Image: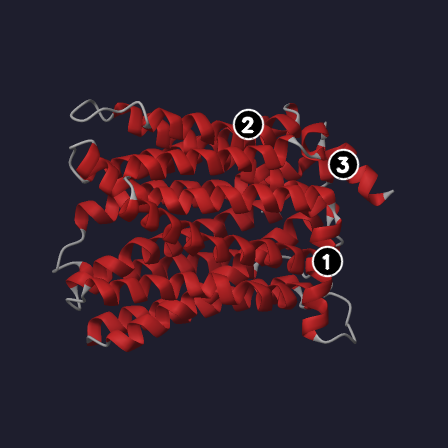
């Protein structure tokens, strides 16, 4: 079994578990614990906290540790967290539930950063995009299937087994990563952890491709977080539709992400990376403008189409920019580079949500939507006015980086 196949199987298990947690935490909090909206908000924040606070330490570990051992540790941490979460639900322990959800999140963060560092060690530069697409497909499939499945079957009587299913996903991932080859660990450093973090951040700022990717990702995630806050009041108060329209729109988003990842896995080597790197953020602008065409009481189809477009192009962009990151970053710095960008992304999401909430409260959801379209425009501009538009092939980029 190839390394990429093992990583794909491991991704299936881990992303299944992660999506179960993402959807299952608010469901379990409400159904099993009868938690208030404030408590549910704190629990959901615990998951985001793992990504925000865990990315930098995980990046340091990835750059220094032996990849197979780090991957095993990541899966075991998540397994421990999900198992503790399942036990906490059964025991009615809300504090234990929140703590174990956070532990599982730290494992997911470490796993994702480790995989991003293993792929360029396992395939040639020209095959990176296809390998990244194969590994990304399980995440996209889980984001589509898990919310639909849990929404259909979870009740007060069945909520106890949600996290048992997450444990099963972690067990699949553990079996897959156990068979990974042993790679050499990173070189030891005499520098302090803080100095190494600063070094990673400085490299991102000094590399024009990484800086463009960071700007594009920051604006896009700011806008997407704001959009999620805006959609429910927009659908219910402005469009006069049922709130369930939002759930279907998110399912369309997940389906599109899977379609985009599948297309990238098949054709990534035949399409100029620059086209994908521009199409991803560029397609988000008309996707949001499509939402502005909806009138009260009309069909929700433009909403579904807009969210499909939001999932399709950016999913291919994510695969392309991951490949660029892997090619232009020194191997012993890749974990920190990915961690710095990841931390920035998760740090900007709360700001997007707060801005949307302020605009809705002081103006209207439509005003917030216009603002979101403008931010998506900045995301596209960050890519369009950079060297990302001139990347003709991954193989050529890899050769230039080595040279």
Q: Residue at x 47, y 46 (%)?
A: 221
**Tag of residue 279:** 2
Q: Which type of secondary structure does the marked residue at label 3 adopt?
A: helix
The Cα–Cα distance between marks 1 and 3, rounded to whole angstroms, is 21 Å
Q: Which residue is mark 3?
A: 397
Q: Give the label on residue 383, or none.
A: none
276 or 375, nearer to the observer:
375
Label 1 environment density (alpha carbons within 10 Å; few <14, some 14–19, many ≥20):
few
- Number of labelled discs? 3
Q: Nearer the viewer, residue 67 or 277?
A: 277
Question: What is the number of the mark on residue 202?
Answer: 1
**Which residue is rendered at x = 41% and y = 61% of the image?**
48
Residue 152 percent across, percent down from the top left: 18, 45
Cβ–Cβ below 8 Å for labels 1 and 3? no
Cα gap from disc 2 to disc 3, whole angstroms: 19 Å
Q: Residues within 10 Å of mark 3 (few under 14, many from 20)?
A: some
Of pointers 2 and 1, the one earlier in the residue sequence: 1
Q: Please say if 350 is above or below 319.
A: below
User: In this view of the protein, which residue sits in the foreground, 307 or 28?
Assistant: 307
């Amino acid at each position: 079994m190839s390394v990429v196949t093992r990583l794909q199987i491991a991704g299936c298990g881990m992303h299944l578990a992660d999506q179960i947690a993402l959807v299952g935490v608010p469901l379990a909090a409400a159904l099993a614990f009868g938690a208030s909206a404030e408590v549910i908000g704190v629990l959901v924040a615990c998951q985001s906290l793992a990504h925000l606070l865990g990315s930098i330490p995980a990046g340091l570990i990835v750059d220094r540790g032996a990849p197979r051992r780090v991957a095993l540790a990541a899966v075991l941490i998540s397994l421990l967290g999900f198992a503790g979460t399942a036990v906490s639900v059964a025991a009615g322990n809300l504090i234990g539930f929140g703590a174990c959800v956070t532990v599982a999140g730290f494992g997911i963060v470490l796993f994702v950063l480790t995989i991003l560092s293993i792929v360029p060690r396992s395939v040639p530069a020209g095959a990176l995009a296809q390998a990244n697409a194969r590994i990304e497909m399980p995440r996209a499939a889980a984001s589509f299937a898990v919310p639909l499945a849990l929404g259909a079957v979870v009740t007060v009587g069945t909520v106890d087994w949600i996290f048992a299913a997450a444990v099963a996903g972690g067990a699949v991932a553990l079996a897959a990563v156990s068979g990974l080859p042993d790679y050499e660990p990173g070189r030891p450093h005499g520098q302090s952890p803080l100095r190494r973090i600063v070094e990673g951040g400085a490299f991102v700022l000094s590399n024009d491709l990484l800086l463009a990717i960071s700007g594009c990702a920051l604006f896009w995630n700011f806008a997407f977080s704001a959009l999620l806050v805006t959609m429910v009041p927009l659908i219910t108060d402005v469009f006069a539709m049922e709130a369930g329209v939002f759930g279907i729109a998110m399912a369309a988003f997940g389906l599109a992400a899977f379609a985009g990842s599948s297309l990238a896995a098949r054709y990534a080597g035949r399409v100029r990376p620059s086209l994908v790197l521009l199409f991803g953020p560029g397609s988000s602008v008309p996707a949001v403008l499509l939402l502005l065409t909806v009138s009260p009481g009309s069909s929700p189809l433009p909403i579904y189409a807009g969210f499909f477009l939001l999932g399709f192009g950016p999913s291919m962009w994510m695969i392309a920019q991951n490949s660029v990151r892997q090619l232009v970053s020194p191997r012993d710095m890749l974990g920190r580079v990915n961690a710095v960008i990841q931390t920035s992304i998760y740090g900007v999401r709360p700001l997007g949500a707060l801005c949307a909430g302020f605009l809705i409260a002081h103006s209207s959801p439509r005003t917030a939507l216009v603002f979101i379209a403008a931010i998506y425009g900045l995301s596209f501009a960050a890519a369009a006015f950079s060297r990302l538009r001139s990347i003709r092939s991954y193989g050529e980029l890899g050769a230039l980086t080595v040279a």
